[in-house]
Image (cartoon, rainbow, N blue to C red):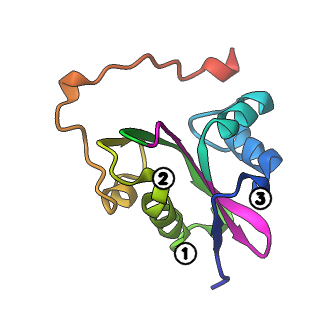
Amino acid sequence: MPHLNISSDKAELDVPAIHHFLSTQSTWAIGIPLATVQRAIEHSLCVGGYIDGRQMAFARVVSDYATFAYLVDVYVLEEYRGRGYSKRLMEAVMEHPDLQGLRRFMLATSTAHDLYGRYGFTAPLRPGTLMERYFPDIYQR
């Protein structure tokens, strides 16, 4: 299995490739503009996964780095799935020094409950306390 390099250095990110995946292949950000992806990356902690210099995985965390974090935009390119790379990516996110000691770490997923469950994520213990404003098709308008 090829060696996976993981980095949180934003200078290493292949932003056009991230945009391509999110805007054409994700289930959550179809049609997202490049400028929106660039702004999101600028204001987030990002983790990239690389094999032979090619970015094949990505995760982004929005956080105040003190009490709260929200995990978003996690993916592994389809041709690399099933090899444990998502676990390595998640380990890097969960072990990142800036994300330790948080009171709440959240995410939303419709497909990867088993993966995230390995890292302590569960359904909300008090779902009645959570609210949201959600516009799922905002990039397609």
Asked if the residues shown at circle 3 and circle 2 are in contact, with their CB atoms under 8 angstroms apart, the answer is: no
For disc 3, the marked residue is 12
Three-letter amino acid code of the residue under disc 2: Asp
Three-letter amino acid code of the residue under disc 3: Glu
Residue 66 disc label: none
Quadrant position of residue 43: top right
- Magenta-span inclusion, residue 50: yes
Above/below status of 52 relative to 67:
below
Above/below status of 66 relative to 127:
below
Q: Can you see residue 4?
A: yes
- Residue depicted at x 59% and y 21%: 137
Q: Residues within 10 Å of mark 2 (few under 14, many from 20)?
A: some
Q: Residue furthest front?
A: 66
Q: Residues within 10 Å of mark 1 (few under 14, many from 20)?
A: few
Question: Could you tell me how far apart the alpha carbons at marks 3 and 1 are, in whole angstroms?
Answer: 22 Å
Q: Helix or strand or loop: what does disc 3 sit on?
A: helix
For disc 2, the marked residue is 98
Quadrant position of residue 38: top right
- Residue depicted at x 60% and y 40%: 44
Query: Which callout, 3 or 2, points at the residue further toward the start of the chain?
Result: 3
Q: Helix or strand or loop: what does disc 2 sit on?
A: helix
Question: Could you tell me how far apart the alpha carbons at marks 2 and 1 are, in whole angstroms?
Answer: 27 Å
